Amino acid sequence: ILNVEQSPQSLHVQEGDSTNFTCSFPSSNFYALHWYRWETAKSPEALFVMTLNGDEKKKGRISATLNTKEGYSYLYIKGSQPEDSATYLCAFSPGNQFYFGTGTSLTVIP
Amino acid sequence: EAGVTQFPSHSVIEKGQTVTLRCDPISGHDNLYWYRRVMGKEIKFLLHFVKESKQDESGMPNNRFLAERTGGTYSTLKVQPAELEDSGVYFCASSPGSAGVRNTQYFGPGTRLTVL
């Protein structure tokens, strides 16, 4: 059983604050790491696919980094807005299928 | 381009009944995946189709679950007979091509199944 952990489980921040959260995964047999943004009752939205150690990806105010040697990825949100409120999911793959973490629930308070 | 669609969005059934969930992937996507999220837990892989063939069904919980993808287009997931522990959100996802898990999987909104 592969263990993918996300922390914190939930987070409340004020509008305008920057925030970050962590996805930890097994450092062996790494193939890909995906980040998704999910609002309940909607489709999880793909944010990033990360495949190389040291990858840094950016999409607007959201960015992510990857360290495959130590088995973690960080997701950063700069200047959080209320519309950023969602659950952020990471999915690790050793090559065959996706293993999801339980997600970090972000609430941005106006 | 239409995204992944799932039907129904919500189903409430009694223990012992049968339910069939449907997924329509993005047109042209050969890969189709089913996942399940039990409340409070992580999304878990159920199975993977490549066109009409089952590539990996290692995540299917037991033989009460049957997935099909006739003709390599839409897929159905039947639960018969349903048990209480089958309650959860069933997601479908699709992806193109042969890059495997390095390809983005595009998710549908899920079907919320409640077994009473």
Image (tube, rainbow, N blue to C red):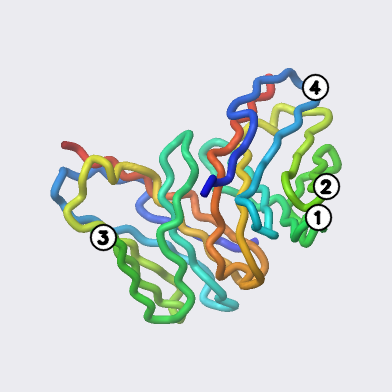
Which of B25 and A78 lies nearest the eye of the viewer? B25
Q: Residues within 10 Å of mark 4 (few under 14, many from 20)?
A: few
Q: Chain of mark 3?
A: A
Q: Residue at x 61, y 59 (%)?
A: B95
Check residue A60 in the rendering and tell me which mark sits there, or answer none. Answer: 3
Q: Which mark is residue B70?
A: 2
Callout 3 touching callout 4 (CB < 8 Å)? no
What residue is rendered at 83% in x and 37% in y?
B64
Label ID, residue B89: none
> Which element is circle 2 on?
helix
Mark 1–mark 3 Cα distance, whole angstroms, equals 38 Å
Q: CB under 8 Å between callouts 2 and 4?
A: no
Pointer 2 and pointer 4 on the same chain = yes
Q: Quadrant of the N terminus of chain A?
A: bottom right
Q: Are marks 1 and 4 in contact (CB under 8 Å)?
A: no
| Residues tagged by mark 1 and mark 2 found on one chain of the structure | yes
User: In the rendered image of this protein, does residue B58 appear above or below residue B70?
Assistant: below
Q: In front: mark 2 or mark 3?
A: 2
Secondary-structure class at tag 1: loop
Q: Position of residue A15 (x, y in %)?
A: 16, 44
Label 3, secondary structure: give it: loop
Q: Chain of mark 4?
A: B
Q: Which residue is mark 4?
A: B17
User: In the rendered view, does A13 fall on the left or right side of B10?
Assistant: left
